[in-house]
Image (cartoon, rainbow, N blue to C red):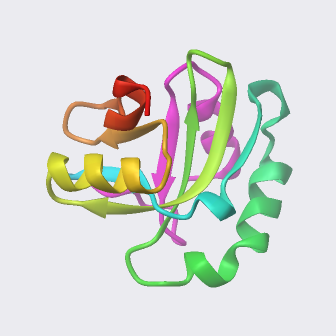
Amino acid sequence: MTAADLVRRVAVPDGGFTVDAQGVGPTAGYVVSIYPACTQSLPAAAVTAETISAFTALNADVLARPGHYLGAWHDPATGKVYLDISVVVGDRATAEELASEHGQLAYFDIDAGRSWPAPAVLSGG
């Protein structure tokens, strides 16, 4: 997957991507960001191949860890894109727990092809 492909995938509300260093994404499970300090948010229009490359370079040490992915999500409520580093877990309960623990707005269900709000966001805290 090219940088241009990644930019196109994140341009649409609730769009995004999860890819490893070879540009390959996971095929099952739940994607959740567990590194809030590494997360960068920016307006969707500001996401370019260059911003993705710069984010990848800045976080290369974390992205080099086994099972870690470059991720992006276009929040339909705000129009912001979140660039982050994600892991994939096998069950929804773990994804919800990790998303809440790390202050995430949502996590992504690969099988359903959509994001779900983190429980803390649903309950307001």
Task: Work out which residue is located at the far front of the displayed protein and give it.
Answer: 125
Name the residue nearer the viewer: 79 or 27: 79
**Residue at the image point whose x is 16% and y is 49% from the top:** 93
Name the residue nearer the viewer: 106 or 10: 106
Q: How many marks?
A: 0
Q: Position of residue 45 (x, y in %)?
A: 81, 25
- Magenta includes 2? yes
Name the residue nearer the viewer: 17 or 3: 17
- Magenta includes 16? yes
**Residue at the image point whose x is 49% and y is 84% from the top:** 65
Rendered-image quadrant of the C terminus: top left
The residue segment tinted magenta is 1-27
Residue 70 vs 62, above or below: the answer is above
Q: Position of residue 43 (x, y in %)?
A: 79, 28
The quadrant holding residue 74 is top right
Residue 16 vs 71, above or below: the answer is above
Determine if residue 118 is in view.
Answer: no
The quadrant holding residue 114 is top left
**Residue at the image point whose x is 14% and y is 53% from the top:** 91
**Residue at the image point whose x is 50% and y is 48% from the top:** 103
Describe residue 38's horizontal placement relative to residue 15 as left or right: right
Describe residue 23's horizontal placement relative to residue 11 as left or right: left
Describe residue 92's horizontal placement relative to residue 102 as left or right: left
The quadrant holding residue 6 is top right
Determine if residue 109 is in view.
Answer: yes
Q: Position of residue 21 (x, y in %)?
A: 54, 72
Q: Position of residue 44 (x, y in %)?
A: 74, 27
Task: Work out which residue is located at the far top of the displayed protein and give it.
Answer: 77
